[in-house]
Image (cartoon, grey):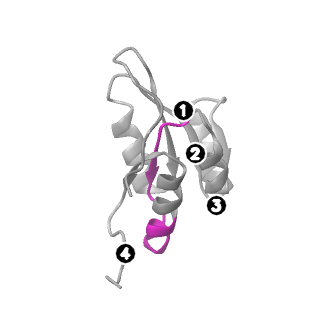
Amino acid sequence: MILQYGKRISSNDKISVAVIGMGIMGNNNAATAIQVPGVQVVAACDLYTGRLKRAKEVYGKDLFVTNDYRKILERKDIDAVIIATCDQWHARITKDALKAGKHVYCEKPMVHYIS
């Protein structure tokens, strides 16, 4: 099955990114992503409120934060997600994000067992 992305993006558009998992790698990936012209972090997800509070300090008070990644996937204004959670969640969140029409960058490994 080929998943189609319905929104056309031009060189003048912003690419809105959400980070799911705001630990060390999530923060590093977000910091790298915003170095690309046109990329902006608009949402963050983590189970720890301290990390979400810090994300608002770094990316602005208007940053959407949640402890439920599905709320990020529901948002139509988010183009892509960075998945930097614990390894055991990578496959599930990636599949859910792709089904929601998001572009995905996922930390490795994707799965622990090929089956």
Residues in magenta, as a range: 78-92
28 to 23, vertically: above or below: above
Q: Which residue is mark 3?
A: 47
What residue is rendered at 67% in x and 56% in y? 67
Which one is earlier in the sequence, the residue at label 3 or at label 4?
3
Q: Is residue 15 magenta?
A: no
User: Please, what is the three-letter code of the amino acid marked with disc 2?
Assistant: Ala
Label 4 Cα crowd, 10 Å radius (few <14 / some 14-19 / many 20+): few
**Residue at (32% x, 65% y) in the render:** 108
- Tell me the residue at 47%/62% (across/down): 95
Give the image location of residue 13, x and y in percent: 43, 19
Instruction: Measure the alpha-carbon separation of dots 2 and 3.
Output: 10 Å
Label ID, residue 59: 1
Q: Secondary structure at mark 1?
A: helix
Say if mark 4 contacts mark 2, CB within 8 Å: no
Q: Label 1 crowding class (10 Å Cα cut-off): few <14, some 14-19, many 20+?
A: some
Q: CA distance from mark 1 to mark 3?
A: 18 Å
Label 2 close to label 1 by CB (< 8 Å): yes
Residue matched to label 2 = 44
Which of pointers 2 and 1 lies earlier in the amino acid sequence? Answer: 2
Left/right placement of residue 68 relative to residue 107 reads right
Q: What separation in Å lies between label 4 and label 1 (alpha carbons)?
A: 30 Å
Which residue is the site of mark 4?
A: 111
**Residues at marks 4 and 1 touching, judged by CB atoms closer than 8 Å:** no
Q: Amino acid at mark 1?
A: Tyr
